[in-house]
Image (cartoon, rainbow, N blue to C red):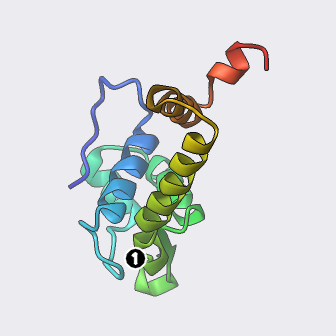
């Protein structure tokens, strides 16, 4: 399910985090699905325990998973609603962009910039 590309410039914890996040938002992992323990996943992937723990911590902070003590770590019901929230936000953004007279390319450039934390506004000195 989760795989690590050692040649990737993306840190291993982020590879783990993003693959789980995608599986949860795409509904490949249903709410309540129990995830492997941090130690087990670290051993399976050949990673340090702290690397997997960081990925799990970030997923929990995002509301995608929750830790239930002895019951383990499971996919949060709130995590499944994330895709719908993003879709609603995208529709709202698209309406705002149209209202402001932006072209599709301009609106997409802004989204791409926001996703990478750099942007046309920052590079234009605005």
Instruction: Name which residue lies at 48% across and 76% down.
Output: 78
Instruction: Name which residue lies at 30% across and 29% down.
Output: 6
Residue 7 place in picture, x, y as percent: 30, 23
Q: Is residue 58 left or right of residue 25?
A: right
Q: Give the residue at the far right of this rendering.
A: 126
| Element carrying mark 1 | strand
- Which residue is identified by label 1? 74
Toward the viewer: 92 or 76? 92
Residue 43 place in picture, x, y as percent: 30, 53
On screen, 78 above or below 1?
Answer: below
The quarter of the rendered structure image containing the C terminus is: top right
Q: Give the residue at the far top of this rendering.
A: 124
Instruction: Name which residue lies at 40% across and 48% down.
Output: 18
On screen, 10 above or below 24?
Answer: above
Q: Can residue 53 be seen in this view?
A: no
Q: In which quarter of the image is residue 21?
A: bottom left
Q: In this view, does 1 lie to the left or right of 71?
A: left
Residue 66 place in picture, x, y as percent: 50, 75
On screen, 123 above or below 14?
Answer: above
Report the number of discs.
1
Q: Give the residue at the far left of this rendering.
A: 1
The quarter of the rendered structure image containing the N terminus is: bottom left
Q: Quadrant of residue 61?
A: bottom right
Residue 52 place in picture, x, y as percent: 44, 52
Q: Is residue 25 left or right of residue 59?
A: left
Toward the viewer: 15 or 85? 85
Q: Can residue 24 be seen in this view?
A: yes
Instruction: Name which residue lies at 35% across and 52% down.
Output: 42
Q: How crowded is mark 1: few (under 14 residues within 10 Å), some or many (20 or more)?
A: many
Q: Quadrant of residue 33?
A: bottom left
């Amino acid at each position: 399910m989760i795989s690590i590309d050692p040649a990737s410039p993306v840190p291993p914890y982020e590879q783990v985090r993003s693959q789980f996040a995608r599986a949860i938002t795409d509904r490949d992992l249903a709410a309540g699905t129990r995830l492997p323990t941090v130690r087990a996943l670290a051993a399976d992937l050949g990673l340090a325990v702290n690397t997997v723990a960081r990925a799990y911590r970030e997923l929990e902070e995002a509301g995608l998973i929750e830790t239930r003590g002895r019951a383990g770590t499971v996919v949060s019901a709130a995590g499944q609603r994330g895709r719908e929230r993003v879709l609603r936000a995208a529709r709202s953004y698209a309406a705002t962009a149209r209202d402001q007279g932006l072209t599709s390319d301009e609106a997409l450039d802004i989204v791409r910039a926001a996703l990478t934390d750099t942007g046309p506004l920052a590079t234009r000195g605005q």
